[in-house]
């Protein structure tokens, strides 16, 4: 059984959806990073060098970071279903969009929240509007970010846009909203939300 290190009201929430997509057998270990000192369940600090959730243990494997975990779960437990195979041309776009969250969208969020002066050619994420504009452009004429089917790239990016929406940083365009609805109508999304909600009751 896998151990999923999670904290309420955190980015780790989106990993319930990913775990449910691959029908994983997992237990949840709750991290409390808001208490002083923080509560770190057994095995957590070894799995997450920065002490951040989400993190995952699967047998001897331990890892952290949402996009990395999503990629691991897809490749290990749902090959060709939630990620294109290593030798498929779509693998390139898949990796680009899967890691668009940690490498572009989340840094762009911080730029916006901190009101940093924009330096779109120097900052790796361009700037907030350019980062979101690329998502908008990518979705033109597409149901999914990559290929003809939902993938972990859709999960990561739609989950992040939802996070931005909750924090009042984004009003999704109609194209983005339609695609997000398509993503969130997946049974695994509902199953993940239910599992997380039960833990917070
Ligand atoms: N890119 C990381 C970000 C993780 C992250 O920032 N987690 C925050 C909660 S939203 C955290 O664990 N903070 C606790 C701390 O820094 O002590 C991911 O998505 O996995």
Image (cartoon, rainbow, N blue to C red):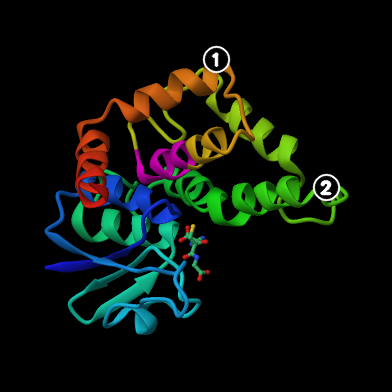
Q: Is mark 1 within 8 Å of ligand 1?
A: no
Label number found at residue 19: none
Q: CA distance from mark 2 to mark 1?
A: 25 Å
Q: Is residue 170 left or right of residue 37?
A: right
Taking the spot 45% from the left edge, 18% from the top edge, the residue there is 178
Q: Position of residue 37 (x, y in %)?
A: 45, 80
Q: Is mark 2 within 8 Å of ligand 1?
A: no
| Residue 156 highlighted magenta (yes or no) | yes
Range shown magenta: 151-159
Observer-nearest residue: 26 or 96? 26
Q: Position of residue 12 (x, y in %)?
A: 38, 56
Q: From what the image shows, is residue 102 above or below residue 61?
A: above
Observer-nearest residue: 139 or 52? 52
Taking the spot 29% from the left edge, 78% from the top edge, the residue there is 41
Magenta highlight: main SS: helix
Q: Residues within 10 Å of mark 2 (few under 14, many from 20)?
A: some
Q: Position of residue 117 (x, y in %)?
A: 88, 50
Taking the spot 34% from the left edge, 46% from the top edge, the residue there is 84
Q: Is residue 14 visible?
A: yes
Circle 2 SS class: loop
Which residue lies under the disc numbered 1?
Answer: 174
Observer-nearest residue: 187 or 92? 187
Q: Residue furthest front?
A: 36
Instruction: Name the N-terminal-most of marks 2 and 1.
Output: 2
Q: Is residue 87 visible?
A: no
Circle 1 SS class: helix
Q: From what the image shows, is residue 56 above or below residue 188?
A: below
Q: Is residue 91 left or right of residue 121?
A: left
Q: Quadrant of the N terminus?
A: bottom left
Which residue lies under the disc numbered 2?
Answer: 120
């Amino acid at each position: 059984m896998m151990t999923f290190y999670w904290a309420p009201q955190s980015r780790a929430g989106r990993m319930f959806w990913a775990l449910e997509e691959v029908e994983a057998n997992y237990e949840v270990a709750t991290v409390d990073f808001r208490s002083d000192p923080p509560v770190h369940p057994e095995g957590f600090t070894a799995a997450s060098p920065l002490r951040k959730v989400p993190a995952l243990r699967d047998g001897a494997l331990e890892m952290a970071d949402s996009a990395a975990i999503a990629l691991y779960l897809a490749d290990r437990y749902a090959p060709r279903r939630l990620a294109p195979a290593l030798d498929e041309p779509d693998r390139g776009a898949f990796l680009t969009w899967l890691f668009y969250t940690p490498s572009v969208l989340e840094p762009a969020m911080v730029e916006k929240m901190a009101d940093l002066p924009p330096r779109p050619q120097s900052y790796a994420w361009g700037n907030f509007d350019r980062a979101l504009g690329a998502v908008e452009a990518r979705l033109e004429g597409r149901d999914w970010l990559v290929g003809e089917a939902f993938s972990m790239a859709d999960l990561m990016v739609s989950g992040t846009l939802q996070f931005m929406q909750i924090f009042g940083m984004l009003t999704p365009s109609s194209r983005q909203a339609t695609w997000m609805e398509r993503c969130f109508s997946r049974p695994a999304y509902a199953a993940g939300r239910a599992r997380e909600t039960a833990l917070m009751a």
